[in-house]
Amino acid sequence: MNQRVHTWLLESDPAIRWQVLHDLTATEAKEVAAERARVAREGLGAQLLALQASDGTWGGVAWNHGWDSTMHVLLLLRELGLDPESAEARRALTLVRTHVTWANCGPPECEHNTFFAGETEPCINGQVAASGAYFSEDVRALIERLLSEQLPDGGWNCDAPDRSSCSSFNSTICVLEALLEYEQSIGSTPEITVARRRGEEYLLERRLMRRRSTGELIERDRKGPGVWARFAWPTWWHYDVLRGLDYLRRAGVAPDERVKEAVDLVRSRQASDGRWPLDASYEGTPPLDLGEKVGEPSRWITLRASRVLRWAEG
């Protein structure tokens, strides 16, 4: 990363700054922690926390299609790196744990489920479990359900078992992130580790973007508008190549020849000035303006791509 791009990243929200210091520099832990603490008090993190209603919800519900629900905001706070031990985080999570249910937004049989009990779809439950584990909530039952739903090919699919016997990249990445977050934040078991590694092999066997059966490049998401070679932030439930690589980086997977094509794709998307653009956003209204526009240089994509290349290059 050139100095100009490094400076540009640091001239931004505390959520970006602390991750740049942590992932891309040799900054002392005390300074990183001080910067991270600002997420709860300044910028996007503070704005999102301020939007929580007295009933514990964001957007009035546990989940919706509009990206401004309780689940979606918790995902954002996790990606921003809000310190789970901060007073602000604990206050917000107490409200969610105590008051939020899946009433009026999930399957009828889940109406009375508490938020961290989840609902029925692996992609949604994966997102709930990832945030829950990050904030040290009790999502063990949800993790056990996800383990029981792993398919023979190593992944997960919200259409299984009735409409599909094959896994989905979208569902699989959501569940993998939940399993990894649980292991890193709460603790691992052999069962979780084995399932996670099988899921990672699902991605790697497909070079993160190809059909295993034919080797054909998967250009578009069959269930949505996503193009896997174009990078979005936030990704929500959508898979793309950068999200897959960033997951493998966090999981400590050693890069091998199976990730080379995907890494080369990330490298090819870098502009001549050293930054990466925001390629796409998904239909729906987030809880607030996240400060980035499609086609313009993106600090979030640049941060994620930079640390992926750092991982890939050793």
Image (cartoon, helix red, strand yellow):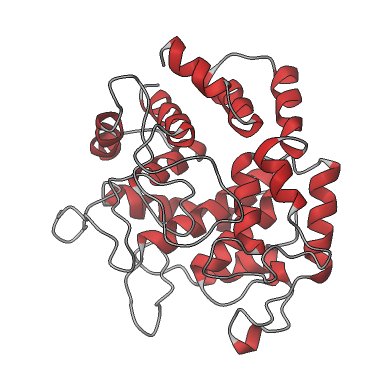
The image shows residue 20 at horizontal and vertical percentages of 56, 24
Query: Residue at (80%, 54%) from the top-left corner?
Result: 92
Query: Residue at (59%, 71%) from the top-left corner?
Result: 145
Q: In the visual, does 121 lie left or right of 97?
A: left
Quadrant where the C terminus is found in the figure? top left
Considering only vertical position in the picture, is 297 above or below 159?
A: above
Place residue 268 in its image quadrant: top left
Quadrant where the N terminus is found in the figure? top left
Considering only vertical position in the picture, is 252 above or below 169?
A: above
Number of marks present in the image shown: 0
Query: Residue at (74%, 65%) from the top-left corner?
Result: 57
Considering only vertical position in the picture, is 303 above or below 7?
A: below
Q: In the visual, does 187 lie left or right of 302?
A: right
Q: Say if residue 195 shows up in the picture.
A: no
Nearer to the camera, 56 or 132: 56
The image shows residue 49 at horizontal and vertical percentages of 74, 49
The image shows residue 234 at horizontal and vertical percentages of 49, 49
Nearer to the camera, 10 or 168: 10
**Farthest bottom residue in view:** 108
The image shows residue 192 at horizontal and vertical percentages of 57, 56
Place residue 54 in its image quadrant: bottom right
Nearer to the camera, 248 or 240: 240
Q: Say if residue 36 shows up in the picture.
A: yes
Considering only vertical position in the picture, is 172 above or below 263?
A: below
